Amino acid sequence: MPSFDIVCEANFVEIKNAIDNASKEINTRFDFKGTSAAVELKEKEKEIIVFGDAAFQLDQVEDVLRNKLTKRNVDIRFLDKGDMQKIGGDKVKVHIKVKNGIESEQAKKITKLLKESKLKVQAAIQGDAIRVTGAKRDDLQSAMALIRADVKDVPVSFDNFRD
């Protein structure tokens, strides 16, 4: 029986490369000379930490990071920005979580969308992914098109297509 998986996984190699490129640009830019502007990646926690002297500079560093991620074809919707925290003096930082996996609420919305579409497919939540099975390949492709059109807030991709 044909099936595929709906997943939400960021490419961490590309994220690491984008952060390295952003760090190089931050170190060479004139307006960041002598400041605490920096970008750091914690791979175990899947988290990016952005440092700056003030909120305005923090926004500029985040903009550099977003541009580098976009050039590396990493979807910005993977990033979940936290609140700004003061470190000491005027220095501030922001923790940005990298989403990995579909949250349970979003997974329920996607399965409900597939059930209401009257397509002849079944969706089952399996951890942080959704397995969609159907009798015909055309039904699965229609389900993919429906998900691409209706699910805009989560960067989903389709893996493990079996015929």
Image (cartoon, rainbow, N blue to C red):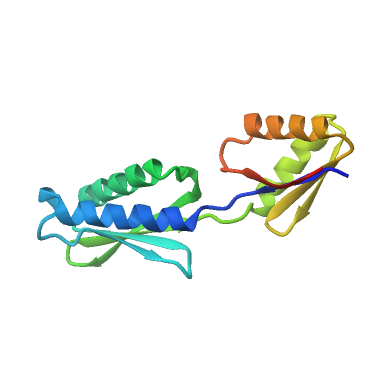
* In the displayed structure image, the side of residue 31 where residue 98 appears, left or right: right
Q: Is residue 54 visible?
A: no
On screen, residue 42 above or below 156: below
Where in the figure is residue 108, as x and y percent of width and height? Answer: 73, 46
On screen, residue 3 above or below 37: above
Where in the figure is residue 42, as x and y percent of width and height? Answer: 41, 67
Write the residue at 29% across / 53% down: 21
Where in the figure is residue 45, as x and y percent of width and height? Answer: 48, 68
* In the displayed structure image, the side of residue 128 where residue 32 appears, left or right: left
* In the displayed structure image, the side of residue 159 where residue 17 appears, left or right: left
| Front one among 10 and 63 | 10
Q: How many marks?
A: 0
Q: Residue 50's image quarter?
A: bottom left
Q: Residue 89's image quarter?
A: bottom left
Quadrant the N terminus occupies? top right
Write the residue at 45% across / 44% down: 76
- Single out the residue that lies furthest toward the front: 163
On screen, residue 95 above or below 149: below
Where in the figure is residue 8, as x and y percent of width and height? Answer: 60, 50
On screen, residue 113 above or below 63: above
Quadrant the C terminus occupies? top right
* In the displayed structure image, the side of residue 52 where residue 114 appears, left or right: right
| Front one among 77 and 11 | 11
Write the residue at 61% across / 43% down: 156
Q: Is residue 111 visible?
A: yes
Q: Residue 82's image quarter?
A: bottom left
Write the residue at 50% across / 49% down: 78
